[in-house]
Image (spheres, helix red, strand yellow):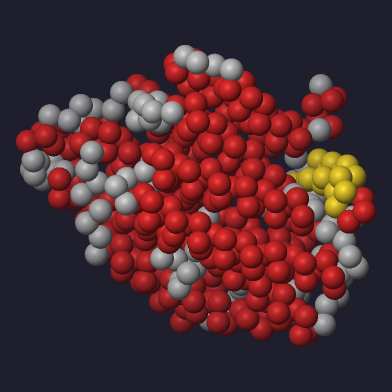
């Protein structure tokens, strides 16, 4: 047990990669699916142990592990978690078994390769959220792009090649900017890649300006912020269900996490100087994303544009530099991962039955699919922040934080919430209520027990966090206060 606790994060990193090796020796597809599910469940168990062992009263990094890797270049294998990163690790671990379950019957070709890619991106993401060495962070940041690209172009929709190339081009552009920023920090911060050391350094105003710009653009492309968002709807609409879940649920959070882990603590002066522009960009994203979602006839594109709007709340909360805003932003990242993942799984379940994502091809599903409609309704109302569901508390805290800075932004952002209610309720009306628009929609089978098991954990989280967000607030509180005290304030 001591060996497990002393190297808990390393075990979480190693298990998915060991799982890939195990899958390589299996031939039976059913066994491959079961083993992959078992491996992701081990990750869930390890994440719960991490959660239970985490001391939320401490401000610094916990479960820190360091090992000399390339001493000539001062590169280490260094990992650890604080109250912000632990939530991203748990979110990653929770969503991956659901990705395996939602692909159980939908993926019938190259099953081993597909599930191996899920395990690969899981292991890489855990490193990204725990890395305390910038070189290690960058390597695994790059690695996350590879499985997503192959998931899109090999198992995606009819326009998968174009969507995959667009995803890679945007991602590579962001990666190059990130690399420039990391090299700049290395040269100006004492020739080290140690994140904890670099955050203690003081940089000149001009250095902060250029380095902040490089990091900001890299993370803005990954989130994505308007106007760097155009790759997202295409990638979502063409990706298989699990690909969309991973992309929306976890990969987009890398951008917000990067702002919190790098931009604010390393470049406080530049963060303050750029903040007014970023805040107005965020407000623009909230309104623009909602407006574009309202115009969509494709279920996946509607959810994709809603993500643009929701991630606008994240950057809005981060760059007001107060505890309410930042706590709301972190909660919004976690909650968006839950609700958007659930919506994409629901759309995937419909697509498996009809091979159509067009809203006009449905209608009247409350008669033929009552269990599905009940859960779809819950996730949809959570998507626009109905009180009592998880998204409400995150958006509420963000707006409270923004009210201390600019109340006009609060009023404009509330327009985005109104738009979210409009497009979600209109979608529900056309998909679940009324009369079926096609003969096929009249006889669609309701979700199976396996599909129900995929959605029930997310439904429980939506309600539990919405009604009692205390545990999430407590685990991040000390880290958020430390970030504010040591950063822009």
Q: Quadrant of the C terminus?
A: bottom right
Question: Is residue 177 placed above or below 95 in the rendered structure?
Answer: below
Residue for point 25% across, 53% down: 298
> In the rendered view, does 316 fall on the left or right side of 350?
right
Residue for point 44% across, 16% down: 30
Q: Quadrant of residue 414?
A: bottom left
Question: Is residue 69 placed above or below 5 in the rendered structure?
Answer: below
> In the rendered view, does 320 fall on the left or right side of 290?
right
Residue 391 pos. (x, y %):
46, 53
- Number of numbered callouts drawn: 0
Question: Is residue 340 placed above or below 170 in the rendered structure?
Answer: above
> In the rendered view, does 421 fall on the left or right side of 269?
left
Tell me if residue 252 can be seen. yes
| 387, 334: nearer the viewer | 334
Residue for point 80% across, 49% down: 61
Residue 230 pos. (x, y %):
41, 65
Q: Quadrant of the N terminus?
A: top right
Tell me if residue 42 can be seen. no
> In the rendered view, does 479 fall on the left or right side of 255?
right
| 97, 172: nearer the viewer | 172
Residue 31 pos. (x, y %):
49, 15
Residue 413 pos. (x, y %):
42, 72
Q: Quadrant of residue 193?
A: bottom right
């Amino acid at each position: 047990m001591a060996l497990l606790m002393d190297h808990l994060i390393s075990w979480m990193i190693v298990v998915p990669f060991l799982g890939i090796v195990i899958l390589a020796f299996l031939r039976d597809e059913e066994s491959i699916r079961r083993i992959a599910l078992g491996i992701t469940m081990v990750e869930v168990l390890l994440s719960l142990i991490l959660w239970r062992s985490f001391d939320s009263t401490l401000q610094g990094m916990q479960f820190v592990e360091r090992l000399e890797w390339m001493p000539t270049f001062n590169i280490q294998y260094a990992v650890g978690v604080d109250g912000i990163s632990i939530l991203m690790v748990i979110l990653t671990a929770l969503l991956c078994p659901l990705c395996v379950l939602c692909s159980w019957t939908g993926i019938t070709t190259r099953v081993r390769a597909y599930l191996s890619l899920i395990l690969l991106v899981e292991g890489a993401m855990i490193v990204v959220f725990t890395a305390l060495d910038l070189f290690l962070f960058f390597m695994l940041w790059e690695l996350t792009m590879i499985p997503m690209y192959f998931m899109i172009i090999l198992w995606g929709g009819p326009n998968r090649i174009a969507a995959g190339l667009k995803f890679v081009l945007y991602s590579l552009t962001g990666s190059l900017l990130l690399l420039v920023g990391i090299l700049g920090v290395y040269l100006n911060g004492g020739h080290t890649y140690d994140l904890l050391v670099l955050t203690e350094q003081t940089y000149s105003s001009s250095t902060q300006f250029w380095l902040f710009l490089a990091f900001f653009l890299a993370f803005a492309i990954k989130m994505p912020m308007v106007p760097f968002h155009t790759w997202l709807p295409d990638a979502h609409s063409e990706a298989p269900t699990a690909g969309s879940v991973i992309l929306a649920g976890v990969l987009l959070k890398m951008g917000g996490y990067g702002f919190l882990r790098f931009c604010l603590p390393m470049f406080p002066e530049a963060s303050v100087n750029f903040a007014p522009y970023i805040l107005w960009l965020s407000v623009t994203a909230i309104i623009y994303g909602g407006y574009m979602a309202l115009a969509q006839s494709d279920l996946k594109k509607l959810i994709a544009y809603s993500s643009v709007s929701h991630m606008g709340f994240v950057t809005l909360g981060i760059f007001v530099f107060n505890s309410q805003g930042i706590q709301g932003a972190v909660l919004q990242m976690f909650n968006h991962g839950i609700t958007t993942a659930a919506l994409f799984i629901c759309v995937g379940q419909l697509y498996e039955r009809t091979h159509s994502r067009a809203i006009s091809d449905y209608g009247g599903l409350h008669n033929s699919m009552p269990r599905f409609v009940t859960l779809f309704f819950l996730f949809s109302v959570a998507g626009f922040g109905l009180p009592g569901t998880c998204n409400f508390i995150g958006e509420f805290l963000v707006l409270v934080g923004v009210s201390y800075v600019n109340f006009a932004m609060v009023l404009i952002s509330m327009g985005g919430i109104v738009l979210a209610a409009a497009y979600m309720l209109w979608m529900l009306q056309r998909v679940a209520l009324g009369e079926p628009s096609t003969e096929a929609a009249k006889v669609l089978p309701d979700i199976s027990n396996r599909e129900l098991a995929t959605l029930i954990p997310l439904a429980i989280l939506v309600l539990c966090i919405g009604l009692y967000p205390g545990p999430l607030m407590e685990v991040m509180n000390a880290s958020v206060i430390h970030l504010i005290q040591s950063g822009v304030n």
